[in-house]
Amino acid sequence: MSAQGDKLVNRHGEPLRALVIGASSGIGASTAQALAESGARVVGAARRTQRIDELEGVVPVACDVGDPEECERAVAEAVEVLGGLDALIYAAGTTGITPLHTTGHEAWTEFFATNLFGAALVSRAALPHLQAATSDGRAIFLTSDSAVKPYPGLVVYGASKAALSAFCQGLSAECPTLQVTEVMVGPTIDTEVGDHFDMEVFGYWFDRWSAEGYLRYDYQLATDVAAVLLEVVRADKPDPMVLAAGNEV
Ligand SMILES: NC(=O)c1ccc[n+]([C@@H]2O[C@H](COP(=O)([O-])OP(=O)(O)OC[C@H]3O[C@@H](n4cnc5c(N)ncnc54)[C@H](OP(=O)(O)O)[C@@H]3O)[C@@H](O)[C@H]2O)c1
């Protein structure tokens, strides 16, 4: 990757070709938009494609990452639109309050399907394109500060992000020509991640997180995380793990 002025170009001097999974809201939408505004050619994937349609310069592709065939098809469509792929950014994710004594197989499967299995299946489909001689070969995954210190009440989510972190390390080891980056995200307020939380239940756990030292970073905005992701995409050799979080509190 190199930059011509502020324009994002790949190492052949062509506009960077990027696929953002989870581009319909929050961090993924901000990132897709920021990439397009920086001159990249961008495909955004998610279930709510009409939301991606509203992002200028981002081509929407439908994908439910819980469906293995849709993961393959979305990557194939993106590669067709872009004529190859330089950067895959996996921003899809789901969370929810899931106390361990009430959480069964269905919830565990749902969280891991979106946060881990989808990442693995999209990566598998993208690998031949990212490893092509014409590609910059970048794969970027969003984990969470809860991957290293799972918040009580969010252990299923934290465990899925810890598994995604291990996946990033394994992908990098297995495919040394790829530039794999885990971006560990801290609390980010203007996204839809908590929209379905029951506020009373959330309040109970939030008080515990505050009292027990889980809230370690100031809040940030989705555009702050997008700016970090753009720095990662611009860097010649990004660190394998990058923190995108507000100031430590
Ligand atoms: N916000 C935070 O405080 C925070 C902190 C740490 C890490 N993160 C991580 O950052 C990433 C982005 O989160 P966000 O806060 O921006 O949340 P968000 O606004 O809820 O965005 C989540 C995105 O994931 C997509 N998604 C969810 N399930 C999907 C599925 N089955 N198939 C395809 N796409 C799916 C959603 O699209 P559709 O619903 O349209 O499919 C949406 O575009 C997630 O991985 C999250 O875990 C967030």
Image: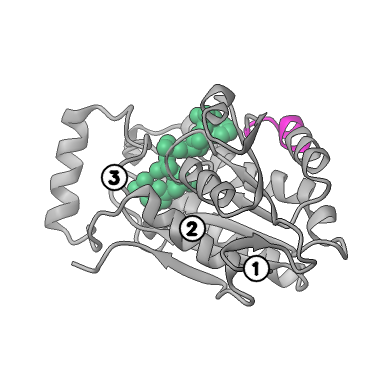
Give the residue type that dot 2 points to. Ala
Q: Which residue is mark 1?
A: 4
Asked whether 84 or 94 is in front, the reply is 84
Asked whether 126 or 207 is in front, the reply is 126
Image coordinates of residue 37 in percent, x first then y, are: 54, 49
Q: Earlier in the sequence, mark 3 or mark 2?
A: 2
At 51% from the left edge and 26% from the top edge, which residue is drawn?
Answer: 51
Q: Examine the rendering and report whether any part of residue 37 can be seen.
A: yes
Q: How many marks?
A: 3
Disc 3 element? loop
- 124 vs 180, left or right, is right
| Tag 1 and tag 3, C-beta contact below 8 Å | no
Q: Which residue is mark 3?
A: 189
Q: Earlier in the sequence, mark 1 or mark 3?
A: 1
Q: Residues within 10 Å of mark 3 (few under 14, many from 20)?
A: few
Q: Is residue 226 above or below residue 189?
A: below
Disc 1 element? strand
| Tag 3 and tag 2, C-beta contact below 8 Å | no
Q: CA distance from mark 1 to mark 2?
A: 36 Å
Give the residue type that dot 1 points to. Gln
Q: Residues within 10 Å of mark 2 (few under 14, many from 20)?
A: many
Is most of the magenta stretch helix, strand or loop?
helix
Q: Is residue 245 above or below residue 67?
A: below
Give the residue type that dot 3 points to. Ile
Q: Which mark is residue 162?
A: 2
Asked whether 29 or 144 is in front, the reply is 29
Image coordinates of residue 21 in percent, x first then y, are: 60, 42
Eye-nearest disc, 1 or 2? 1
